[in-house]
Image: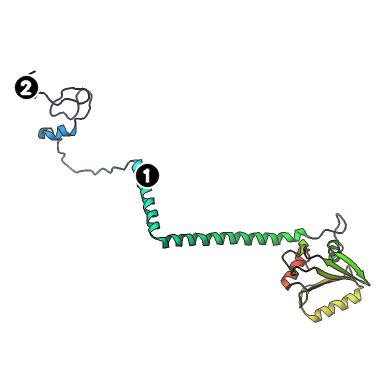
Amino acid sequence: MDTETVSSLGPICDYCLQENLPADTRCARCGAPRPPEQLASDPLDAPEQRTGPVIEEKVLPHPGVQWRASVGAVAHKADNGLRNPGRIIAVILGTGTGIVLVVGGLIVAAVMVLIQLLPSFSAPDVARGTAPRSWADQLRAVSTCQRIHVDERCVLTGGHYLLFGGITGGRDLIFWIRQLPEDPLGVTVRRWRAEGGRILCDKATFIQISPTAAVRYASGPAGVVVETDPFTDSARAQAFLTRFSVFC
């Protein structure tokens, strides 16, 4: 093949070696595109310029590129945080405060539930399957009592669960039980009223927390009087009554 014949040849396809016309942008046999350098080398082969309005096409980046960009943004923020220790401390303190508030709320909720459940851990009944005749019977069932003349001196040990929460300051609770006829019982109740204190019930059953935070209880139907040593304060004295489910 002479030189003139070679120069007349059109562009050769890089894929199937098919000779194509200079104006072809793709191979006539396999459809492969011509290399850009071939198109740029020949002004006649340049693609036809389009006329009319140009519609802009938005090309979205490949998902992998988007992911790398997101990772880069996170890394950039982390780097900024390392360069600004004050911001890191503020975030840590803010998170710590939130944790403290959540834990504190859980503790308060647990305490409230425990307070509600304490009455259910009341003293056992004297007779199985029957309700006690009075609060005095409940107290006798959980205490050690000794008769002194007409009174009973009873002791509830300081470690007993009914004294949970240090309501006696860790001390044993000493109380007195006395059986009285109706008239002497009324005299006792009038004396308690005169001494003052907070009256919780003033019906057939009289319940009072004295000025010294002692519990005073008198049951007319049962003809019994109970008087305890002082608790640490009036709120804890009332808590003791609540644990026995003693209400008006």
The residue nearer to you, when weighing 169 against 28, is 169
Q: Is residue 120 left or right of residue 48?
A: right
What whole-number distance in Å separates the C-alpha atoms at marks 1 and 2?
55 Å
Quarter of the figure with the N terminus? top left
Q: Residue furthest left?
A: 4
At 35% from the left edge and 47% from the top edge, which residue is drawn? 69
Q: Specify the quadrant of the image occupied by residue 202.
A: bottom right
The quadrant holding residue 198 is bottom right
Secondary structure of residue under mark 1: helix
What's the residue at 17%, 42% (across, down)?
52
Which residue is under mark 1?
A: 67
Front-lying residue, 27 or 162: 162
User: Hey, which residue is sitting farthest right in the picture?
Assistant: 149
Is 133 in front, or is 142? 142
Residue 200, horizontal then vertical, whole percent: 76, 72
Q: Quadrant of the C terminus?
A: bottom right
The mark nearer the N terminus, 1 or 2, is 2
Tell me what residue is drawn at x 84 percent, y 70 percent: 175
- Give residue 162's position: percent from left, percent from top: 77, 63
Is residue 141 placed above or below 28 in the rendered structure? below
Which amino acid lies under the numbered mark 2 shown in the image of this protein? Answer: Thr
Query: Dot 2 lies on which element?
Result: helix
Disc 2 crowd, CA 10 A, few/some/many (<14, 14-19, 20+): few
Question: Relative to 15, does residue 159 appear above or below in the rendering?
Answer: below
- Per the image, the residue denoted by label 2 is 3
- Is residue 164 in view from this perspective? yes
Amino acid type shown at disc 1 = Trp
Residue 12, given in percent of the width and then of the height, sits at 16, 25
